Image (spheres, rainbow, N blue to C red):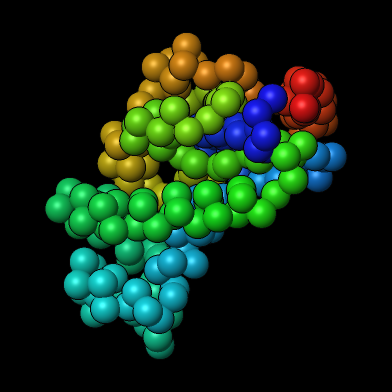
Amino acid sequence: MANRPKLVGLTGNMGCGKSVVAKFLSELPKIVVISTDEIAKDIVSDPQHRNKIEEIFGALVFDDNKPDFQLMAETFFSNPDVKRQFEDFVHPLVWQAVDNRINELPDDSVVVIESALIFENSNRWRFDEVVLVTCKQREQYRRLIVERGLTPDQIDVRLKYQLPADQKIWQSDWVVHTDGSIQDLKTEIVNLHRQLIQHL
């Protein structure tokens, strides 16, 4: 292994359980999880970026000096120009923050970087290995409707920006299925962890 941490991309379409997998992995030895979504939220919430965010989304996106992430998401997914502007602004800042965090970590770490659009944004090159989290479409829609309050139409709009899982599986090193019980998933994660920390 090179003199740096092992970099593992953790990806999967919305509603497939990526964040749950990230949480379980973060509780295991040698694993450090970095969420690109959380970094992006921190960037948007930083007062130094408020003018740029308002330029992209409009002043109404701030409520009592705090960003309205739900309104931002609705605008982001319904307006391709806003989507492009925001991605052009935030993605370089996110990956710079990720790199800074990686540079602080011991070389024998496994850094799991949770990011939904690794393949869509041509970021596969950043990682030594990629883990794809997936589930059956019916379960995916159920979770998004019940747990996030989205309508089927809203789900369809958002998923059109994500590649189908079958186009990601062949590009991934590991695939985690989240259709079963929590105990089944934990067993799968323990087995994955064993593979990830090999050859450190």
In this orientation, which residue lies closer to the viewer: 41 or 166?
A: 41
Residue found 49% across the figure and 41% down from its top: 115
> Within the image, what quadrant is residue 165 found in?
top left
Q: How many marks?
A: 0
Q: Residue furthest left?
A: 81
The x, y position of residue 91, in whole percent, is 36, 51
Q: Residue furthest front?
A: 3
Residue 9 visible to the viewer: yes
Residue found 61% across the figure and 44% down from its top: 19
Residue found 28% across the figure and 71% down from its top: 53
In the displayed structure, 116 sits above or below 58; it is: above
Q: Residue furthest top?
A: 170
The x, y position of residue 29, in whole percent, is 84, 40
> Within the image, what quadrant is residue 190 found in?
top right
In the displayed structure, 188 sits above or below 40; it is: above
Q: Quadrant of the N terminus?
A: top right
In the displayed structure, 175 sits above or below 115; it is: above
The x, y position of residue 105, in whole percent, is 70, 49
The reply, left or right, for residue 96 in relation to residue 181 is left
The x, y position of residue 45, in whole percent, is 44, 73
Q: Quadrant of the C terminus?
A: top right
Residue found 36% across the figure and 52% down from its top: 92
In this orientation, which residue lies closer to the viewer: 183 or 153?
A: 183
The reply, left or right, for residue 182 in relation to residue 38 is right
